[in-house]
Image: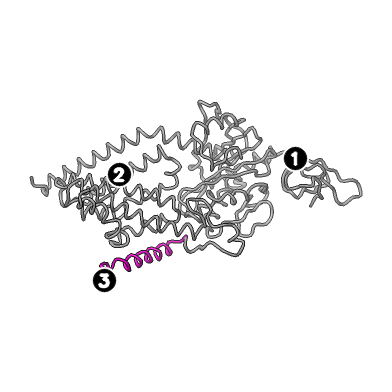
Amino acid sequence: MDVKIKETLLNPILKGNPITVLVLGICSSLAVTVELKGALVMAVSVIIVTGLANLILSILRNTIPNRVRIIVQLVVVALLVILVDQILKAFAYPVEKQLSVYIGLIITNCIVMGRIEAFALGNKPFASLLDGIGNGAGYGLILIIVAFFRELLGSGTLLGMRVIPESLYDAGYMNNGLVILPPMALILIGCIIWVQRSFQKDLQEK
Amino acid sequence: MNTNGNIYTVVYSTIIVVLVAAILAFVSSALKPMQDANEKAETISQMLAAAGILDKDAPATNEQILDTYANEIKEAFVIDADGQKILDLSVARENIELRSDLKPQNKELLKKNAEYKPQVELPVYVFNNGSTVIPVYGAGLWGPVWGYVAFAQDLKTICGAYFDHGSETPGLGAKIKDDPAFRELFKGKVPNFDAEPAFAIVKEAKGDSEVDAITGATMTSKGLSAAIATWLNGYAPYFTANAAPAKNKCNCGKFCPCGESCECDCHCHPGQTQCECPGCACENCPTGSHKMEE
């Protein structure tokens, strides 16, 4: 694979991760990470939306009037999000029922708008598509890590299946109610940022 | 080309918006039949789950759900606020009629002993296994909560329930749907139509017409409690008029403590203060015989 293509795709996953490095999309990552399943579907939906939004707006980039560009971006993103929601409703109803609130949240997700503004409006369509997919994946990765710990510690389950044995509960172990609430998600994201910066020294501010 | 001119900007925005609107309208109308079929099957599966016919956790296709409903339903009809049947709902496989437009029905209209009996249409679904399913609908914390409550053949005892919600907090309020243990609490409960409310979800439930609330989901529990109480009020005339005489009631006025309507036939002998209930076959009475309570 071409080095530049590889970099556009993989850079947002670790070195330029939208959540831990750009600190975008924090709000929705607090809301959808209570359970792993929701986080997984949200991750896939965001990858689709960021990828396609970047692609479409990159194709349109030379025609968009500068003064209304944010509105045009919003219209395109909203279109994609509603399409994802409608298609899930028709073909994957149980999943949609669980996630319809969160899927609407993608519209307000800063990553989508942020990447369109920062990348898609200044780059060719193919590179923009890869950048969108990469950023969606970077967002999804953090979502899944946070959701893993929140569901495990908060409910004692993973993907709805019980993983913490009954004997532990009998011995006095209890699920941590705080983990289910949004503040703990913020603390977990903070821990992830901490771990990442202790490995990637160049991210540390002097 | 100057992409910053006023005319260009207006024309461009108009074209984009019209184009997007056209795409959305087309997709929406193309997918509508499938979405409606999904919603109908979901509604039916929730009723079947409440009636104890279908396991909601086992995946089932829409066709399977409709087949099960058509096979298991005995009759479906609509009653008014006085408990009188006003029309029948079709239960044929090709044309299953439901009343799922519960939202417009104002809860004020269902108030207990209201002087003004409004025009309400309350659906009743009776299944072959003897259970009667009614809907409940109300406001949770973030959005609507609704569900189905199934009554046993005696029309007094709740034999199952299934709840769902629009957007309650996952892990907390969402437990009304996700936690099977919560639904189990309703089994064997007997709403008291003479009391206000007839049924309640409270902290530290006591008695037959209360169940325990969910920790950390006070508002959801309260909302669901109000929803159930409101709708039970609406159905109270129907249930009180049609309830079977209690089979678990002894002729001296005492009750079988297991709370279920067991088929036992017991009599107090003159001069005795306690009566026995031999032949009770319900699962809470393993010995098949026990003392009756006040």
Q: CA distance from mark 3 to mark 2?
A: 37 Å
**Label 1 environment density (alpha carbons within 10 Å; few <14, some 14–19, many ≥20):** few
Q: Is residue B279 left or right of residue B170?
A: right
x and y, in percent, of residue B27 in the image: 32, 36
Q: Which residues are magenta?
A: A180-205
x and y, in percent, of residue A23 in the image: 30, 62
Tell me the kind of residue under disc 1.
Pro
Q: Is residue B155 left or right of residue A12?
A: right
Q: What is the number of the mark on residue B245? A: 1
Q: What is the number of the mark on residue A80? A: 2
Residue projecting furthest to the bottom: A206
Labels 3 and 2 positioned on one and the same chain:
yes
Labels 3 and 1 positioned on one and the same chain:
no
Q: Eyeballing the image, is A117 above or below B16?
A: below
Q: Quadrant of residue B153?
A: top right
x and y, in percent, of residue A81 in the image: 32, 45
- Is A138 in front, or is B67? A138
**Label 3 environment density (alpha carbons within 10 Å; few <14, some 14–19, many ≥20):** few
* Position of the N terminus of chain B by quadrant: top left
**Label 2 environment density (alpha carbons within 10 Å; few <14, some 14–19, many ≥20):** many
- Is A48 in front, or is B221? A48
Q: Chain of mark 3?
A: A
Label 2: state its secondary structure. helix
Tell me the kind of residue under disc 3.
Glu
Q: Chain of mark 2?
A: A
Residue located beneath label 3 in the image: A205
Seen at 23% across and 54% down, the residue is A7
Q: Residue B272 in magenta?
A: no
Q: Given contact means CB atoms under 8 Å apart, are the residues at marks 3 and 1 in contact? A: no
